[in-house]
Image: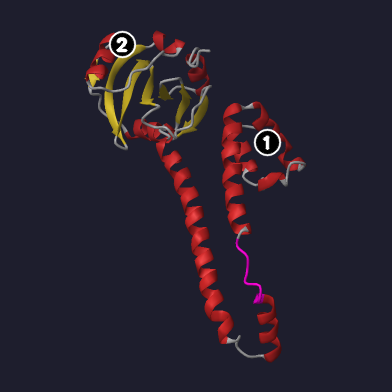
Amino acid sequence: MTNEEAKFVLRAYRAHGADAGDEALAEALALARRDPELARWFAAEQAFDRAVADKLAAIAPPPELREAILAGAKAGAPLPAPWWRAPAWLGLAASLVLLLGVAGIWTTRANAASEDITAFAADYVAGGFFLGEHGADIAELRAWLEQQKAPLPTVLPEGFHRLRSLGCKRIDYRGKQVSLICFGDGKEYHLFVARRDDFPTMPVRERPQYFKRKGFAGAAWSDERNHYVAVTDDSLQALQQCMKNACPE
């Protein structure tokens, strides 16, 4: 079972641990206990579910609601005006409070998702682009990016040192600067670098998280200073070999 498959299954896990003993969820739960990144995602997902459940549980119907419904049913007539006027507004107010609370939670999650440059990086490569600076000397490319005040990689993955540098550019994404350094050796490898301080809600990945998108293989990881995303038209297996030493201890 992959992490994405586990996430699909775990989205059905009810808040407050109601499904802890469900055999259908056992494999996904076991994977979440072993995988730190999946565990963080699952904890955030459960926190959101609990917040929504708690807000729903906090809404109580007016105490006279049951009696009023029964009285109306017996009489076969509209419910008395004194009942529906005030409680209706109370119900509306409670609904608005609930919606605003849930909207706030969704906004927080949406902001976190929008800061994750993983999908953006793959889409950017798939759409084609021009380099801002060309060159085969990685030191010169770093110097150019530094002049542009763009983020610089702390340590390149081991396999990238065996690739030929092609060039780089600075990208503006959501008002922040992201560096792109391109390498090539038959296949192209594109390394995106973003400062963690600029994208504080982007997931911190202590180990490379691999993905496929639009025909490209990719990996996302973080160190103490930056977030990184590598996108390549090479195979996922080749990318994994290239990613050695991506997250040093």
Q: Label 1: few (<14), some or many (≥20) within 10 Å?
A: many
Task: Describe the element under mark 1 as helix, strand or loop.
Answer: helix
Query: Residue, x 57% and y 36% (percent of image)?
Result: 41
- Residue 200 placement (x, y as % from top left): 42, 32
Tell me if residue 187 comes above or below residue 112 in the rendering.
above
Residue that label 2 marks = 138
- Whether residues under marks 1 and 2 lie with C-beta atoms below 8 angstroms apart, the answer is no
* Left or right: residue 116 compared with residue 28: left
| Amino acid beneath label 2 | Ile
Near-viewer residue (154 or 183): 154
Magenta stretch: helix, strand or loop mostly: loop
Label located before the other in sequence (1 or 2): 1
- Residue 189 placement (x, y as % from top left): 39, 20
Quarter occupied by residue 58: bottom right
| Amino acid beneath label 1 | Ala
Residue that label 1 marks = 28
- Residue 60 placement (x, y as % from top left): 63, 65
What is the magenta range? 59-65
- Residue 195 placement (x, y as % from top left): 37, 25
